[in-house]
Amino acid sequence: MNTFIGFSLVVGIGSTLVLDLWGFILLKLKGISPTDWGSVGRWLLGLRQGEWVATQGDNRPPSVVEKVSGWSFHYLVGIVYAVIVVIGWGVPFIHTPTFPPLFLVGIVLSSIAGLTLFMPAMGAGFCGRKIPNQANSILMMLIAHTIFALGQYGFAVLYAST
């Protein structure tokens, strides 16, 4: 069980850090803003009042609680994706990781979740249909999730080698 927890934490947190590094690089080189996890935190906290979709036009800066909630959720999701890999491919995967399962979870599953759950929840509509740059947003998400999957693989191999 400790191996399962250790793997999930190392791979989940490590790959999410890689994703955040990618976002930082895009911001510095291209001026592309990463996901505002404070806004995600505001949405999460709004769920308690039955607000399933983020309120558009709320321009207040996110509070500290909203930021902490959003960032915690972001890293928790990364850990959950690592857990899904082990549940789907078994504990032996921890010792001999391969890329195909991480491709399926890190790119395919996470992109489907982003398009069908996250984007609608944040007010962008199903598959981002309400945003003017839908195709570009989907492409950027696929690239980011590819980076995430590569991070998953790198940290899975690193964990297996220890």
Image (spheres, rainbow, N blue to C red):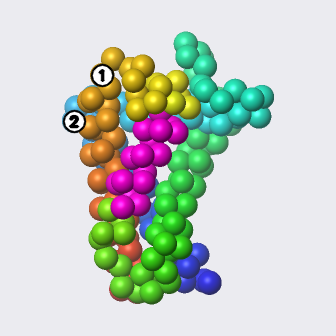
Residue visible at 30% across and 22% down in the picture: 133
Q: On the image, numbered disc 2 is attached to which residue?
A: 29
Q: Nearer the viewer, residue 73 or 109?
A: 109
Q: Nearer the viewer, residue 24 or 95?
A: 95
Q: Which stretch is magenta?
A: 104-119
* In the displayed structure image, the side of residue 63 where residue 112 appears, left or right: left
**Where is residue 22 shown, x and y percent of the image?**
31, 47
Q: On the image, numbered disc 1 is attached to which residue?
A: 133
Outermost residue to the left? 29
Residue 112: within the magenta?
yes
Q: Is residue 80 above or below residue 54?
A: below
Q: Main secondary structure of the magenta part?
A: helix
Q: Amino acid at mark 2?
A: Leu
Q: Amino acid at mark 1?
A: Asn
Residue visible at 27% across and 29% down in the picture: 135
Report crowding for label 2: few under 14, some 14 to 19, many 20 or more residues within 10 A (C-alpha): few
- Is any part of residue 152 visible from this angle? yes
**Where is residue 63 shown, x and y percent of the image?**
65, 29
Outermost residue to the right? 49
